[in-house]
Amino acid sequence: MLRDPSLRFRLFPLVAVLCLGLAISQAVGATTPIKSPNDDNRYRALTLENGLDVLLISDPDTDKAAAALDIEVGSGDDPVDRAGLAHFLEHMLFLGTEKYPDPGEYQQFISSHGGSHNAFTAFQDTNYFFDIQPDSLEPALDRFAQQFTAPLFNNDLVEREKKAVHSEYSSGLKSDSRRFQSARKAVTNPAHAFSQFAVGNKKTLVSNEETNLRDELIEFWENHYSANLMTLVVYGQQSLDELAAMVRPRFSTIKNRELTKARHDAPLFEPGTLPAELTVQAEKEVRRLTLAFPMPSLEAEYADKPASYIANLLGHEGPGSLLNVLREANLAESLSAGLGQDLGAETTFEITIGLTPQGVQRRQRIVDLTFDAIRQIRQSGIQERYFRELKQLNEISFRFRDKPDPRQQVTHLAMRLHDVAAEDVLQAPWMQEQYTPEKYRHVLSHLTPDNILIAVLSPTALPDDTTTTQWYRTPYQFTTLEPGDVTGQASQALASQLALPAPNPFIPEDLSLVDGATMDHPEPLTTDGPTTLWYARDTSFDVPRASVYLSLRSPLVRNTARNAVLTDLLVENIQDRINAYAYPARLAGLDYSVYSHLRGITIRVGGYNDKLHVLLRRILSNLASPSVQEDRFEVNRKALIDSLRNQRRQKPVQQASRAMQEALIDGVWSIQSRLEAAQSLTADDLRSYASEYLRRLDPVILAHGNISKAAALNLHGQARALLLGDSERVDVPRGGIHALPKGLSNVSLNVGHPDVGYALYLQGQSTAYPVRARYRVLAQMVGSPFYQSLRTDQQLGYIVSASSWEILETPGLGMLIQSPSATPEAIDQAVNEFLSAFTSTLVGFSEKDVTREKNAVISRLREKDRQLSERSERYWREIDRGETGFDSREQLIDAVRSVEKSELLSAWKETIQPRKRALRVKAAKKLETDRSVIEALQDAPFVY
């Protein structure tokens, strides 16, 4: 591990006569991490007697408890002849332990107590995590710990779960990210573990007379899983001492085999390989250029972050930046820079550029210009003012850090705890301690033309005899370049436009909180003019932030597919024009979005309120006077067409879900109709539409957070003056969900994917709170058993779920399956059998069981807003629904609390099990597309 041994905090065995409470309160070597001034939680880092590092987090006000265990073992540890074994082990640890042998017990317990769980396998890590109702943390930890002390590895489950891993592999066969990664692995040094196939499938995990997979699994677990390679983070309501009392007896029993983290010292590329170019054929309309520069690991430099300093300059998007110059030349759409995956001894610095079709053809110009930008940084970019600005922004961000979701926090901290000092584990991402020019130059010394992999992903077809990767069958070409092939000098016309960033004008100066108490909910300040303004002062999070939403509802948007496409293009045009100007605002803690929806366009600006009005004014000005450039219009139009075509190449379950939306939601146009509209549009069409759009509007504004009433009224006046002055006020009603006819409606889709997709939607009969509550509770009850039966027991596929599908307040139960082996008919039969069998399961629920499941639903509904933006979004959804009492959540909770078992049985027997009103979508290669049901539903009445 990359830590100073002096920073490890180990506990030595205590004298046996000491009581557990004394051992906890006087833990040897315990430390308190440095936390944000805005963080009320209490923390304690310690090490158990078996060498397992632990971080405890006490939050008395939390409505979710969580835990994560990370082990420094991953796919990089797979045996050469057992690709995917680490990933397979991750799957198996969930499926039964000596104390809890039922393979579905862990998942059922977590789900029934309002929680969720998952795990993932990375190159050097495997991470297991869950969240749950706070009062169920201790029994959840008991089950969790058993997975690492006494897993069963049941032989029947080994054979079954192998199918799940293969299904996961199969579901990603058409994923361009996985295909691109497989090509990068193929050109990596074969002596480096990164080159190996990581997911696994039925071929790599085969078990026969010569090799017993279960035996190898146990051997791998015993030879790699050790307490001294593990970190554990636990988050709960309890005090630190109480949390320690939960953790110590359960996790101290994990064996410390005194193992050492694997090192991968072989070079990532064989000597003489670089510079090189890798060209990969994409499945979708995706065009991306990645410039990867291998260099020694920088994990130990987390306090100074020299790579972040360079990435901040190369990845800047303001005027004169590399991206800005490329966008103006219509060669690129996006750019990011920073470290790639750290592999222990080595990492890569990567610049990833989203290309236009023109950019693919002229990628050498882009590579050359990138080296011009690097040269400019090398010559003039190492200045203390850039460091000071970066440090200032990080300090402000850490000072006013939002409270994260507990599950996300424990997951990230468990991984981070391996690599940073315990006292730094909370602040590490925001640390920028010293100005270190020599370290910046060290990073730059590796960004050279002779140390580069130029990787291009595009849909351009490669020759039929092109090499393909072993597992994803991805066509690729790999060419080692001569030293002079990458000149690194662009044309003067492009290079002369490059400029280093100017001082950031959006750094907040006034970070004070406004006077006045936090309001219970938004109140209308104006209702009689052309605009409704909702206002809520809120300083309860102790952060100087605010959120402003402006919805420009228009009667035009839902009229035709053409108008829907024009609305999307209008949004793209606004974002195009604002990006370079607004990028410094993003760096300074202001975020914004402009997005289209079923009623029009919404502008959202959030973050530090000091200069929020400046950014909002610029966005409004761009919308009020849209300048549509012919070349940028064409770039955006073609990008939209690509996006629509790519939707037809998504996973089968995604395409099935999309078909559901087209059938059910008023105003969702088919992909085909949108494509046809986009093909014929011109820049003049957009100019005319932009002008027409603003003539008749139903505008609504929300100002929420650290903002005074006067400031909110000023923003309202600004919107009226810049944008709404000449608009006619009209009413744009909310859309609805089409009511399904009685019986089972069927849709078939032909998809170009080897897997079969299946979606079943069971619709509720009204939007009344009692009906919504019943469907929420039934979805909660059915989720885990459905997964256990169809995924774990029957192994129909990796993607298996049953959950609440409440759309626009219309209740529903949705079931999704994607299978690499079962036919649509076999899946449907299995679902039917489950629905029938679950009737008796539901009958067998005791009143205590029903109450437990209701409480799980209520705990999710009552989850607290952890940051201002979450509360703003909740208020905004209420305004959109017309729920201006801002109590719809409380009404639904009351309805859930009132649900009776007899009502659940009645709904199940009379509506769900017989599929009284159901829509089924099957998606497969062998099916013919039949969308007649979708077209027939377009005129169906709404569910009320």
Image: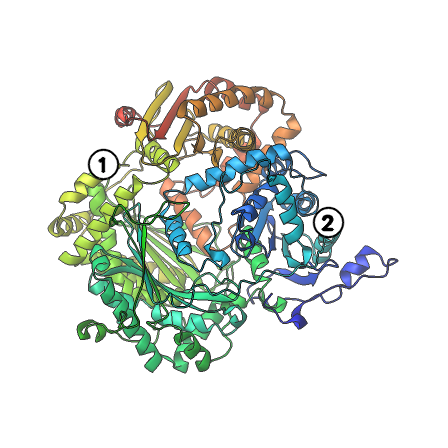
Residue at coordinates 40% horizontally, 73% vertically from top-left?
446
Residue at coordinates 75% horizontally, 63% vertically from top-left?
11
Camera-side residue of 834 and 743: 834
Vertical relation: 254 (above or below) 814: below
Residue at coordinates 32% horizontally, 27% vertically from top-left?
926
Disc 1: CA contacts within 10 A as few (<14), some (14-19) or many (>=20): few
Q: What is the x, y in percent for residue 146?
A: 69, 44
- Image-quadrant location for residue 482: bottom left
Kindly report the distance in space between the C-alpha atoms of the residues bearing marks 2 and 1: 57 Å
Kind of residue at disc 2: Arg
Q: Is residue 15 left or right of residue 908?
A: right
Residue 337 visible within the image? no
Camera-side residue of 448 and 491: 448
- Image-quadrant location for residue 717: bottom left
Vertical relation: 840 (above or below) 221: above
Vertical relation: 496 (above or below) 60: below
Residue position marked by numbered label 1 in the rendering: 672
What secondary structure is marked by label 2?
Answer: helix
| Image disc number at residue 201 | none
Count of numbered tags? 2
Disc 2: CA contacts within 10 A as few (<14), some (14-19) or many (>=20): some
| Image disc number at residue 250 | 2
Q: Where does the N terminus fall, quadrant-wise?
A: bottom right
Residue 403 visible within the image? yes
Q: Is residue 164 left or right of residue 492?
A: right
Q: Where does the C terminus fall, quadrant-wise?
A: top left
Mark 2 and mark 1 lie on one chain; the one further toward the N terminus is 2
Q: What is the x, y in percent for residue 631?
A: 15, 58
Kind of residue at disc 1: Gln
Camera-side residue of 326 and 160: 160
What secondary structure is marked by label 1?
Answer: helix
Q: What is the x, y in percent for residue 776?
A: 50, 32
